[in-house]
Image (cartoon, rainbow, N blue to C red):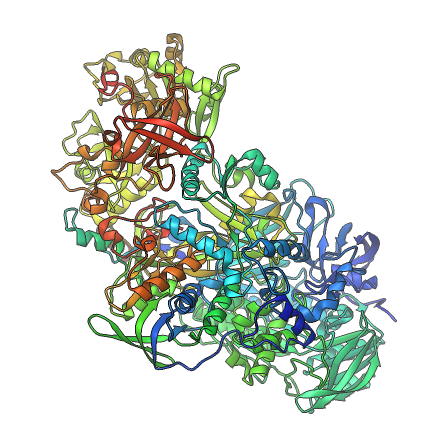
């Protein structure tokens, strides 16, 4: 009794054995084997344990529908759980192990669960585990969470490594006229004929080999080679080992290509490629999947689908049994019987039908097969099948007639066309009772279907159906509408008889519908009894179809059983929607190269490297990295930024401000345009002047701020915050293109074109004078506060300078073309360093602006009005601007809204945090009176200060104590509320 | 994935574009009354079916487009530059 | 109705599960009800239950065009949390969380609410301070279950987070410990079963085809199962709200229907114990592991308006990138299924539970991303509103007028653009 590798035939290379390991045993297979065939060749039948009952499971199929042989392949950080042995190509050195079992899949302690299976019916967990048994006493979630710990440990299947995935994946793009999905006869024929017409065709086949079901048929090599050669010769791009896992809008397909694996991949080796394919037309030639039916212990190892028995025989040269029982309801099983008998097996075939296909029966019997009609396998005996009980049709069930020893059971309940990709497009599956399957008859999109995906079962019919769609595809490509699909009529000699379950009167059999999740026929009936009669409820209540195979085998059977329970026809119960992906896809493949540091782009300013060379520690600002601080030997961040800020106030500092958004606003109506988008007037801004402006959103809340420089009558240079640069640009374009097309204005982002440095401090002018060709242009008279000048460096490099100040000191921003950034910075630094100047980063910038009461994104958080931030006086009353209407809404104008304030610790040695909540001292609870947005240790004042918002603003809190409540970190700190302008409120320093 | 046939750049993936919103909204003058602004900014017909909507080819020509698209099955029926003058110029160019 | 408890599970195990009956009836529609709730999703079912249980309303129907719980109830990532900070939202979601904690007992149905902690990563000092404001408010309004974890604590709790080569270095996390996940379908069925036991008629496959009304009120709903008159009507139809609103002749709403995808991997042995969330550099991501072992995750909207319950490929890719960015080990986990739901995105990201221009019509909508966690409180306050014809103070702000007054509830500060409130 056993498995026999035939001495000839099949698509395996007997001269190239491959070594592999299964649960520690060293075994050997052949090149061309799948992991499943290699294990079977070694008589390994028990390969897994089921989800709930830990029943032993083995190979049930030869393809993607497998729900028994799910293994872990690989070790260490290359461990892959839940791999289908049936689709895993064998390679030398492959290491496989069992999962969801202890100590191993053959002797699994968890199998004790099986004893309690009467209690583990569908949905039992909704009915208990809430409280203390038996009556669920108690409250809250504590007890459930204790149970849950055990449940979670028991659930799951394989174990994922905690280590980072060491493998590489690529994402690649393909464009074609026609994508053909499926490399069987239908797909190859359609692809070849289309390519012959000059159409650019890509064909994807999930299997490592082309040929589809021909691979499972005897002596088909010549035919496959001819078909493949024709396709290649006509120019079809053939992609084997590539699964089209989903169809998306507008002809876009997602596909996964698996590259050949080795036990120890080279460091650079790509494991898989995720393809985005854009096709004008898609041909679905995805074939059909054979399903089993529900009968007693149909999940036992040595029980497979009928065609799988044939696949292992003809493709892998494995005769899986000597004494074979085949049971089914369609013509397809005869080929399997015939081939196995020819290979020397003792074959008994039970056909549930009354009217048998005469010619097929004769051929089979001539080959030595014993054929019985109106009977079927009803039950399986043995931990691993060793006998079956045969029943004969009686009423709407079966009566057990005999028991028969065997070592292989092959079952077929019919074929289901693979309509998954069509379902992804929302196509409605139509039930064809005569074929016992769902077929898609039409979609609204440029998709055609042929072959057994359209329910043609015979090879010749598949070829003809592929030929028939060619004119339709061509018409579709030239933009014409094309006829709907033609659906096959099967092509069997004898009609099918529905067979979804072998019910035996007065016997309770454990018959599985969805084996991986242990969903049994009785679970479906329980769901019915409890009112979960719609197919979506059935699925969710029993978990039918939720397992790794996505219901490829079980869904139709489950539907049929529910229809039976309801006394309805199958289409009246509904269909389930298949969701992508068709087969599962590794997240690593989808992420491809966007991992680690490459997750998102990194934006570096033109001075990035210069900053690093000069000791910058960088910090993240959106996608940018900006200098955070420039620590000198032994300095902490706090010491560094206090020194930097102090230096700016005392002498001069340089800061890279390149990341600010910069937009060229040009044209005859540029001034009018700015006048509409800023709350304050820009129409009368003089050439050579800059102005600080604020923009509102349509809804009247503050959007962004920045300075805009008038370089000429029709030429403005707008700066935005770093965070909102892109958003403001999009906004300006929207306004100009959609709302105000009459304005003659052009906007262009020049953020990347100009590099900028803030030169701040009492000595800032001296620094500029040192670098400029004409130092006089920055004199107090020539360039007063808010003045703008375009000039050149001594080297002749053009620069533009504005005298603006974020720090509150006399300060300038100087911009040059990005290519000259380092050159400009070198000059500035050469002038600043001897003046005891410094480089400063964001932390010092923050300290300076907080002292000054200048706002940033922390204050302008999208919920703030002009009044809140203290800008109301800036708003023009002479002109309308974006947001001016809705900002007048009553709740935005009401008294007592939180307003921008400065915050000092009452005890000046105290500290507080941004994110603390400002409260009345006698009411430190609830939503408080305000919050702190930013804090710094003020170099000028020598203690901590902050900005924030509080109801009524500083005036309302004069002489009143407040508490900064920070229960998460520092607890409560008493604070004083002051004006936000804590440093040089009159602005003498920056004007002077 | 939605593919939009940009009048300047040809058919491109949706990831090159950013979605704006309902293209049928007419924004009132900046000094219109509060109700007009309230409605334009907040009230939406939220069409189930064919709607005109705005997209910007943000990683391309940066043009704002008016796209007629079904919100039920995502099919696109027409694409036009949102700026009427530019649209007419492009159409004249193409018709030449 | 057989009570759900260990005793009955044992008994039925021995009796071949024969003692269980329908979890809710399949009644014929009556011609008139006191209250008709349109929409058999979580919020509609919860509302019906609380109306029957706590407001002694007798004749209640829930009309559902398909099967109950078939919309967003089964299309979310099952996260329950209350980390909202604006007045109104804060109290509302906290009420909901408190109710979630007792929901299994309340309904006698194990909804598997597992308080596994919600861990919200931050990547910059600025982000830490912004989240600290939110979580400080939570503390001050009574939530002792909030913490700020530094990197060391975070590593200790979630060792396989990417703290080595993340593009955006992880600095720490804000944590709500009472937050977690629940079994979404069970919530729908649990409310349905409990409401049914109180006499609520749950009418499935009952689509509202037209609405007849006079100037001030709704009179009759014409459904696919006949005409139904109702003294009071509540709408709770999420993504389809605008359509129903227009059927009632009420014009436009500050709502757009957008599409949000959700994802699940093949089942794995326990890998991620908490709900882990982050948003940085334009990315937005959340992940947890279901009791069955699948990693359940999601990210941003598909960004364009849609009524199609199917998503597109670039988001599949984008969200996978977000997953591997913080958990490099999940590169080898495999995506099993992805699907999408239609979100009723509102103009400020906050919901509506309010009265309407019609005297007997009440609106429950605008749930954005947040409908699942809101279920209990949504049902609770909506039932209270319908029964007493006035909003509880907690939901007073959740009205349609707030865009006229400017009293918007914008947790994100994103402004009046629906798609930005994910």
Extreme-right residue of the structure: A1
Q: Residue at x 31, y 42 (%)?
A: A863
Vertical order, A202 against A596 (above or below):
below
- Residue A30, x across and y down, in percent: 80, 58
Q: Is residue B71 left or right of residue A900?
A: right
Vertical order, C192 against A958 (above or below):
below
Quadrant for the N terminus of chain B in the image = bottom left
- Residue A224, x across and y down, in percent: 68, 68
Front-most of residues B70 and A99: A99
Vertical order, A816 against B63 (above or below):
above
Task: Tell how many labels.
Answer: 0
Front-most of residues A960 and C229: A960
Q: Quadrant of residue A452?
A: bottom right
Q: Is residue A593 visible?
A: no
Front-most of residues A501 and C405: C405
- Residue C300, x across and y down, in percent: 44, 51
Extreme-top residue of the structure: A834
Q: Residue at x 58, y 82 (%)?
A: A565
Quadrant for the C terminus of chain B in the image = bottom left
- Residue A84, x across and y down, in percent: 69, 60
């Amino acid at each position: 009794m056993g498995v026999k590798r035939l001495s000839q035939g099949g698509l395996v290379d007997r001269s190239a054995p491959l070594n592999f390991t299964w649960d520690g045993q060293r075994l050997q297979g052949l090149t061309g084997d799948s992991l499943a065939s290699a294990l079977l060749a070694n008589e390994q039948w028990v390969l897994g344990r089921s989800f709930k009952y830990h029943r032993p499971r083995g190979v049930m199929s030869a393809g993607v529908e497998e729900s028994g042989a799910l293994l872990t392949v690989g070790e260490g950080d290359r461990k892959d759980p839940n791999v289908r042995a049936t689709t895993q190509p064998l390679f030398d050195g492959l290491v496989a192990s069992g999962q969801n079992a202890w100590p191993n899949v053959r002797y699994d302690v968890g199998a004790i669960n099986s004893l309690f299976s009467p209690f583990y019916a569908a949905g039992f967990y909704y009915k208990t585990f809430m409280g203390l048994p038996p009556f669920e006493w108690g409250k809250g979630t504590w007890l459930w969470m204790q149970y849950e710990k055990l449940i979670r440990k028991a659930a799951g299947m394989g174990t994922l490594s905690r280590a980072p995935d060491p493998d590489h994946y690529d994402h690649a793009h393909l464009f074609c006229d026609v994508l053909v999905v499926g490399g069987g006869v239908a797909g190859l024929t359609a692809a070849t004929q289309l390519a012959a017409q000059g159409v650019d065709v890509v064909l994807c086949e999930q299997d490592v080999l082309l040929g589809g079901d021909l691979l499972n048929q005897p002596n088909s090599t010549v035919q496959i080679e001819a078909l493949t050669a024709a396709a290649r010769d006509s120019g079809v791009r053939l992609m084997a080992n590539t699964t089209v896992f989903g169809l998306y809008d507008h002809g876009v397909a997602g596909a996964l290509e698996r590259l050949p694996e080795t036990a120890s991949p080279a460091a650079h080796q790509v494991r898989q490629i995720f393809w985005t394919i854009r096709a004008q037309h898609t041909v679905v030639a995805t074939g059909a999947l054979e399903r089993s039916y529900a009968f007693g212990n149909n999940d036992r190892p040595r029980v497979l689908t009928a065609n799988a028995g044939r696949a292992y025989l003809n493709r892998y040269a494995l005769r899986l049994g000597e004494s074979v029982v085949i049971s089914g309801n369609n013509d397809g099983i005869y080929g399997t019987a015939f081939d196995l008998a020819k290979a020397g097996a003792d074959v008994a075939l039970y056909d549930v039908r009354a009217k048998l296909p005469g010619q097929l029966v004769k051929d089979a019997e001539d080959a030595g097969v014993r054929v019985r009609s109106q009977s079927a396998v009803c039950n399986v005996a043995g931990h691993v099948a060793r006998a079956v009980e045969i029943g004969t049709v009686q009423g709407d069930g079966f009566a057990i007639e005999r028991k028969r020893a065997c070592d292989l059971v092959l079952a077929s309940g019919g074929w289901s066309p693979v309509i998954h990709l069509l379902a992804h497009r929302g196509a409605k599956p139509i039930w064809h009772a005569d074929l016992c399957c769902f077929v898609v008859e039409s979609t609204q999109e440029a998709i055609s279907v042929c072959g057994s995906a359209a329910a043609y079962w015979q090879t010749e019919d598949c070829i003809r159906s592929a030929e028939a769609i060619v004119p339709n595809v061509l018409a579709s490509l030239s933009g014409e509408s094309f006829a709907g699909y033609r659906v096959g009529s099967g092509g069997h000699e004898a009609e099918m008889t529905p067979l979804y379950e072998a019910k035996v009167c007065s016997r309770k059999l454990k018959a599985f519908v969805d084996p991986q999740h242990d969903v049994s026929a009785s679970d479906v009936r329980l769901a019915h009894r409890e009112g979960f009669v719609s197919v979506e409820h059935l699925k969710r209540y029993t978990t039918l179809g939720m397992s790794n195979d996505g219901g490829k085998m079980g869904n139709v059977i489950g539907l049929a059983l529910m229809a039976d329970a309801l006394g309805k026809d199958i289409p009246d119960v509904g269909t389930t929607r298949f969701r992508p992906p068709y087969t599962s896809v590794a997240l690593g493949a989808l992420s491809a190269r966007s991992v680690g540091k490459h997750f998102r782009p990194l934006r570096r300013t033109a001075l990035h490297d210069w900053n690093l060379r000069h000791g910058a520690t960088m910090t993240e600002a959106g996608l940018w990295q900006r200098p955070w601080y420039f620590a000198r030997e032994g300095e902490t961040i706090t010491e560094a930024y206090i020194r930097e800020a102090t230096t700016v106030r005392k002498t001069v500092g340089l800061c890279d401000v390149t990341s600010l958004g910069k937009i060229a606003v040009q044209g005859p109506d540029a001034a009018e345009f700015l006048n509409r988008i800023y709350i304050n007037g820009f129409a009368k801004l003089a050439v050579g002047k800059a102005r600080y402006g604020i923009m509102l959103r349509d809804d009247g809340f503050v959007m962004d701020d920045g300075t805009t420089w008038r370089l000429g009558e029709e030429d403005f240079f707008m700066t935005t915050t770093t965070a909102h640069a892109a958003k403001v640009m999009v906004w300006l374009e929207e306004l100009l293109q959609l709302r105000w097309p009459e304005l003659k204005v052009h906007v262009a982002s020049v953020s990347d074109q100009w590099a900028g440095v803030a030169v701040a401090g009492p000595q800032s002018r001296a620094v500029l004078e040192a670098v400029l060709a004409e130092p006089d242009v920055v004199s107090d008279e020539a360039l007063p506060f808010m003045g703008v000048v375009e000039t050149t460096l001594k080297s002749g490099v053009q620069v533009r300078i504005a005298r603006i100040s974020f720090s509150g000191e006399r300060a300038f921003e100087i911009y040059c073309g990005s290519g000259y950034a380092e050159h400009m910075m070198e000059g500035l630094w050469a002038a600043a360093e001897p003046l005891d100047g410094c480089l400063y980063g964001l932390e010092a910038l923050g300290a300076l602006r907080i002292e000054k009461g200048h706002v940033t994104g922390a204050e302008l958080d999208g919920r703030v009005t002009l009044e809140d931030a203290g800008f109301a006086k800036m708003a023009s009353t002479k002109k309308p601007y974006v947001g001016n209407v809705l900002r007048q809404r009553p709740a935005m104008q009401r008294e007592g809204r939180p307003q921008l304030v400065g915050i000092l610790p009452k005890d000046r040695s105290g500290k507080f945090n941004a994110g603390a909540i400002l409260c009345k001292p006698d009411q430190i609870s609830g939503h408080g009176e305000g919050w702190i947005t930013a804090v710094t240790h003020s170099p000028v004042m020598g203690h901590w200060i902050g900005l924030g918002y509080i109801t009524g603003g500083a005036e309302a809190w004069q002489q009143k104590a407040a508490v900064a409540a920070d229960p998460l970190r520092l607890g409560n700190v008493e604070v004083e509320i002051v004006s936000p302008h804590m440093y040089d409120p009159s602005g003498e320093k920056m004007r002077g | 994935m939605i593919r939009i046939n940009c009048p300047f750049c040809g058919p491109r993936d949706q990831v090159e574009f950013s979605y704006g919103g309902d293209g049928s909204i007419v924004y009132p003058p900046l000094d219109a009354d509060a109700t007009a602004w309230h409605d334009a900014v907040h009230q939406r017909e939220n069409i189930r079916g064919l709607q005109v909507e705005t997209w910007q080819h943000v990683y391309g020509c940066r043009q704002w487009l008016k796209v007629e698209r079904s919100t039920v099955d995502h099919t696109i029926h027409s694409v036009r530059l949102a700026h009427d003058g530019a649209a007419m110029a492009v159409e004249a160019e193409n018709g030449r | 109705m057989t009570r759900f408890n260990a005793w009955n599970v044992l008994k039925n195990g021995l009796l071949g599960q024969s003692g269980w009956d329908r979890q809710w009836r399949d009644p014929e529609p009556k011609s008139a009800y006191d209250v008709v709730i349109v929409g058999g999703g979580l919020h509609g079912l919860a509302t019906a239950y609380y109306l029957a249980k706590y407001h002694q309303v007798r004749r209640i129907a829930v009309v559902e065009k398909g099967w109950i719980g078939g919309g967003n109830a089964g299309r979310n990532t099952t996260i329950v949390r209350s980390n909202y900070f604006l007045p109104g939202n804060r109290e509302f979601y906290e009420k909901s969380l408190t109710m979630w904690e007792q929901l299994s007992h309340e309904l006698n149905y194990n909804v598997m609410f597992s308080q596994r902690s919600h861990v919200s990563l931050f990547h910059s000092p600025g982000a830490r301070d912004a989240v600290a404001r939110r979580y400080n408010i939570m503390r001050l309004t009574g939530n002792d279950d909030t913490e700020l974890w530094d990197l060391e604590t975070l590593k200790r709790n979630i060792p396989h987070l990417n703290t080595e080569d993340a593009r955006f270095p992880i600095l720490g996390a804000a944590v709500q410990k009472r937050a977690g996940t629940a079994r979404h379908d069970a919530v729908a069925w649990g409310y349905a079963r409990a409401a049914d036991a109180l006499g609520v008629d749950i009418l499935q496959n009952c689509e509202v085809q037209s609405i007849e009304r006079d100037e001030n009120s709704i009179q009759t709903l014409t459904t696919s199962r006949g005409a139904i008159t109702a003294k009071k009507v509540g709408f709770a139809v999420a993504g389809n709200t605008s359509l129903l609103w227009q059927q009632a002749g009420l014009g436009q709403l500050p709502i757009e229907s957008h599409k949000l995808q959700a994802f699940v991997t093949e089942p794995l042995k326990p890998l991620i114990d908490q709900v882990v969330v982050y948003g940085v550099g334009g990315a937005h991501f959340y992940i947890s592991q279901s009791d069955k072992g699948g990693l359940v995750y999601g990210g941003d909207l598909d960004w364009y308006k849609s009524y199609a319950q199917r998503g597109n490929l670039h988001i599949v890719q984008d969200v996978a990138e977000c997953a591997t960015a913080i958990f490099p080990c999940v590169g080898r986990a495999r995506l099993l299924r992805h699907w999408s739901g239609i979100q009723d995105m509102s103009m400020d990201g906050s919901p509506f539970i309010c009265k309407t221009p019609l005297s007997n019509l009440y609106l429950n909508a605008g749930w954005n991303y947040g409908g699942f966690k809101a279920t209990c409180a949504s049902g609770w306050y909506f039932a209270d509103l319908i029964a007493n014809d006035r909003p509880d103070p907690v939901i007073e702000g959740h009205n349609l007028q707030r865009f006229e007054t400017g009293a918007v509830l914008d947790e994100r500060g994103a402004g009046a653009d629906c798609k930005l409130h994910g």
